[in-house]
Image: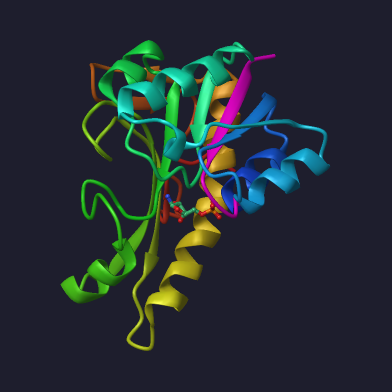
Amino acid sequence: MKSAVILISGRGSNMQALVQAAPGLDFRAVVSNRPAAAGLAWAGGRGIATRVVDHKAHATREAFDAALANAVDEFAPDYLFLAGFMRILTAGFIDRYPRRILNIHPSLLPSFPGLDTHRRAMEAGVKLHGATVHFVTPALDHGPILVQAAVPVLESDTEETLAARVLAQEHRIYPQAARWLAEGRVVFSGADVVQVRGSGVASDWAISPRDPK
Ligand code: GRF
């Protein structure tokens, strides 16, 4: 069975979705850069090893990333899942795990990289918003896309209602991506394009790609 470590900074609802879905990966540890991250207690309560690498205890990004790599490498994971992990990683860290770091981002990339995605989507007047699971490269929020889910932006939406609708999709597609990785179905075609063997785009276009039903 392939293994993974999950990196969090906060409540960890995506971490919970990953673990509870039991996608066929051995989740060996949860690592947080914030000692107070609520997700740590949840993971600990499930018997998953937890580690804290406090970014405030390190003077530079390089020093923090070196300590983070030490914490991760203790568990020798095949994959790293960033799940609400709010630190920008150095190229040195990312290059250590080529095509092995995944991130969930709350927008339809390449639109709205960075923070405050829901507010910015509403201000831009887009009619579709959503979430993206992608491989992490040194270009922030721009790595090869594995799966996306779209939701409508409603006239009645507030930032909070839109965020909640997107989060529900995050909790579907991140475990889906983990399952595809566990099954060995994720293939790169070229440097930037990812395909999932055996998946089709069915009539429900709101998630692409998806397993044929
Ligand atoms: C999610 O919306 C994730 O996409 C973004 O930060 C939020 C983290 O939520 N990067 P949680 O900690 O997984 O609940």
Reply above or below: 82 against 80. below
Q: Nearer the viewer, residue 182 or 139?
A: 139
Relative placement, left or right, of 76 versus 143 is right
Relative placement, left or right, of 21 versus 87 is right
| Residue 200 seen anywhere in this rendered image of the structure | no
Tell me the quarter of the image containing the C terminus: top right
Q: How is the image coloured?
A: rainbow
Q: Residue at x 23, y 68 (%)?
A: 120
Relative placement, left or right, of 22 versus 137 is right
Number of numbered markers: 0
The magenta stretch spans residue 4: yes
Q: Image quarter for residue 152?
A: bottom left
Q: Residue at x 44, y 68 (%)?
A: 163
The magenta stretch spans residue 20: no
Q: Nearer the viewer, residue 7 or 136?
A: 7
Q: Image quarter for residue 150?
A: bottom left
Q: Nearer the viewer, residue 15 or 133?
A: 15
Reply above or below: 114 against 125. above
| Residue 133 seen anywhere in this rendered image of the structure | yes
Residue 92 rendering spot, x and y as whole percentages: 30, 16
Q: In this picture, which residue range is highlighted in magenta?
A: 1-12
Residue furthest bottom in the image: 156
Residue 142 rendering spot, x and y as whole percentages: 24, 37
Tell me the quarter of the image containing the N terminus: top right
Residue 52 rendering spot, x and y as whole percentages: 59, 34
Q: Residue at x 34, y 74 (%)?
A: 153
Q: Nearer the viewer, residue 88 or 3?
A: 88
Reply above or below: 194 against 177. above
Q: Residue at x 47, y 21 (%)?
A: 67
